[in-house]
Image (spheres, grey):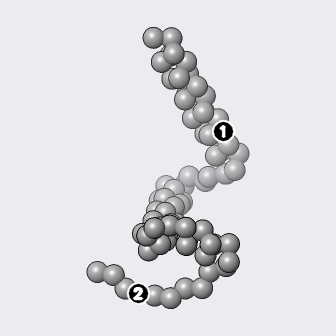
Amino acid sequence: MSKRITVYLPEDVAARVEQEPNASAFVTNAVRSVINREKMQRALDQAGIQVTADGIAAMRERYEAGKRRLASRRRAT
């Protein structure tokens, strides 16, 4: 079931949404992403895990290093 609502958006955001063939689906996905991020943050908080900018940067670097290693292995075969 869906519900129609009216929202006012800043010009730059409205311009981006208007580029989509299905603006409703685009906005729905964006809002669901925020909801999922909030749920994840609550779960981390409840588990006593504090996410910091430094921690995010470190994990991003580990992830990128892993991608580079995997790509290197694939090129070697």
Q: Which residue does the image show at 47% across and 72% down from the upper left?
A: 23
Q: Considering the numbered disc 2 on the image, is that residue within a helix, a strand or a loop? A: loop
* Vertical relation: 76 (above or below) 50: above
Q: Toward which corner of the image does residue 55 lie, by quadrant? A: top right
Q: Return the x and y of residue 36 as percentages of the image width and height.
A: 46, 62
Residue 12 appears left or right of 39: right
* Vertical relation: 68 (above or below) 52: above
Q: Return the x and y of residue 34 as percentages of the image width and height.
A: 52, 66
Res. 77 visible in picture: yes
Front in this rendered view, residue 10 or 44: 10
Q: Which mark is residue 4?
A: 2
* Vertical relation: 16 (above or below) 49: below
Nearer to us of marks 1 and 2 is: 2
Q: Which residue does the image show at 55% across and 72% down from the upper left?
A: 18
Q: Which residue does the image show at 51% across and 23% down from the upper left?
A: 70
Q: Which mark is residue 45?
A: none
Q: Return the x and y of residue 67 as percentages of the image width and height.
A: 55, 29
Query: Where, quadrant-wise, is the C terminus in this rendering?
Result: top left
Q: Which mark is residue 58?
A: 1
> Residue placed farthest to the right in the image?
54
How busy is the neighbourhood of tag 2: few (under 14 within 10 Å), some, or many (20 plus)? few
Tell me which amino acid carries mark 1.
Answer: Ala
* Vertical relation: 70 (above or below) 21: above
Q: Which residue does the image show at 67% across and 79% down from the upper left?
A: 10
Front in this rendered view, residue 39 or 71: 71
> How many numbered dots are placed on residues in this image?
2
Report, in whole angstroms, how far the alpha carbon at label 1 lies from the one at label 2.
Answer: 42 Å
